[in-house]
Amino acid sequence: QVQLVESGGGLVQPGGSLRLSCATSGFAFSVYPVTWYRQAPGKARELVVSGGTFYVDSVKGRFNISEDYGKNTVFLQMNSLKPEDTAVYYCKVRVRGLEYWGQGTQVTVSS
């Protein structure tokens, strides 16, 4: 059974940092890439990071994805956070044609 569980969200001031985690199980972690999405209030869900090579323009130079293969966990390091980064952040994996999502973790950037 494929499972993804996000954690690490919270309230942070502008300019601060957070590290999100996506703990995974039930699939070959080294084979299927995990991607990060976010959904801000009133907006559509958008792709943030994919495959370690694609970063949406608004986060380039500030966000970085990494993996711990021993723990089957993907991290999203977010630096220099801005109010417009406020959103629910989700991790997703596509395994044999099926998409699996975590429950999301709230990130709020506010002074």
Image (cartoon, rainbow, N blue to C red):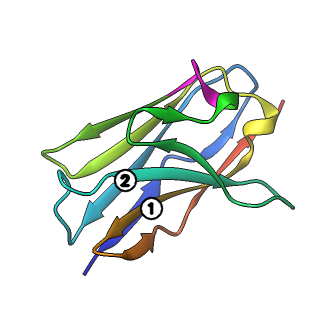
81 shown above or below 97: above
- The residue under the point 17% across, 50% down is 30
- The residue under the point 38% across, 63% down is 93
What main secondary structure does the magenta stretch of the protein show?
loop
Range shown magenta = 59-63
For the residue pair 47 and 110, the one nearer the viewer reads as 47
> Along the horizontal axis of the image, is 24 left or right of 7?
left
Q: Which residue was labeled with disc 1?
A: 92
- The residue under the point 82% across, 58% down is 43
Q: Position of residue 25 (x, y in %)?
A: 23, 67
100 shown above or below 81: below
Rendered image quadrant of residue 79:
top right
Q: Which residue was labeled with disc 2?
A: 34
Task: Single out the residue that lies furthest toward the front.
Answer: 97
Pointers 2 and 1 in contact (C-beta within 8 Å): yes
Q: Residues within 10 Å of mark 1 (few under 14, many from 20)?
A: many
For the residue pair 55 and 104, the one nearer the viewer reads as 55
Q: Position of residue 18 (x, y in %)?
A: 55, 33
Which quadrant does the N terminus fall into? bottom left
For the residue pair 104 and 33, the one nearer the viewer reads as 33
Question: Which amino acid lies under the numbered mark 2 shown in the image of this protein?
Answer: Val
